[in-house]
Amino acid sequence: MSDLRPIGVFDSGLGGLTVAKEIIRLLPCEDIVYFGDTGRVPYGTKGPETIKRYAREDEKFLLSKGVKMIVAACGTVSSVAPDTAADLPVPFVEVISHSVKEAIEKTVSKKIGILATAATIKSGAHRRLILESLPDAEVTEVSGSLLVGLVEEGFTNKNDPLTIEAVRRYVQPFIDRKIDTLILGCTHFPLLADAVTSVLGEGVTLINMGTASAAAVKRMLTEKHMLNPTGGSHRFFVSDKGAEFQKTASVLLGEDINKENVETAVIDSI
Ligand code: DGL
């Protein structure tokens, strides 16, 4: 059995492309519809009610495109608004629980760091899940909301002094606490992985939420006999057109994505 409908992936902006990239790597024959809410980014500095409303509206938009599954490729939505998935008529994948599992498998010292948006850190979602499995873990949480803007603006180069200085400010507590594993708890942050490693050093394992979450997508579609063996197309929607989305999508996904490939989404308010 197969299901030829696309997988729907959404984020507040271009960060969710880091998750889409991992899904494409694991499931090259799946069609994907990506929605980046670039007109309302950032989500991570907003309150829970606003984030939940945005999440419902984004999910509704993807459903209108006939998707068979929704992936919240956004740490903020996954931690603050996972309950918006309860009424969805299609399977849902969030990005927090799978990455926590990976961090628990990889840590040796049980000193785990989380770098995420203010809303995600406030929700305590990663910390709760880590301590459920590893009660004696030492969890260090840092809210790095400013880094989201840096990524959206394309300032991700590890040789850029501005990028390195901003990253250094946020990762210093992880150096002080001698963590051995850092969850990049915002899907924008894998784009800063090189900069983070150049400050933290090679000894700290970085967890990209996309990797474990893409594996979960594959597992779920396989179990439900919903894989698509014949697709491979990718459509991109944004709520506000900016050059950076198209540029980052092209580089990250290794596809020639031009302005015409990125469509403007009209989001119905709920
Ligand atoms: N990429 C998002 C996340 O994973 C959200 C960043 C933001 O909009 O603040 O949290």
Image (cartoon, grey):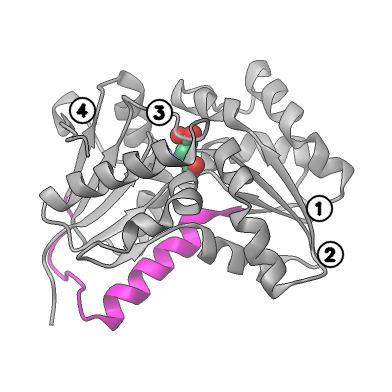
Q: Tag count in the figure? A: 4
The answer to which quarter of the image holds residue 251 is top left
Q: Residue at x 19, y 34 (%)?
A: 267
Q: Label 4 to label 3, Cα distance in Å? A: 21 Å
Instruction: Provide the residue designation for mark 3.
Output: 41
213 within the magenta span: yes
Q: Residue 64: give x, y in percent of width and height.
A: 11, 49
Task: Identify the mark nearer the N-term, 2 or 1.
Answer: 2
Instruction: Provide the residue designation for mark 4.
Output: 258
Drawn side of residue 173 relative to residue 125, left or right = right
159 within the magenta span: no
Task: Identify the mark nearer the N-term, 4 or 1.
Answer: 1
Residue range corresponding to the magenta coloring: 207-233
What amino acid is found at the position of numbered circle 2 in the picture? Ser
State whether label 3 is within 8 Å of ligand 1: yes
**Residue density around tag 3, few if under 14, some if 14–19, many if 20 or more, within 10 Å:** some
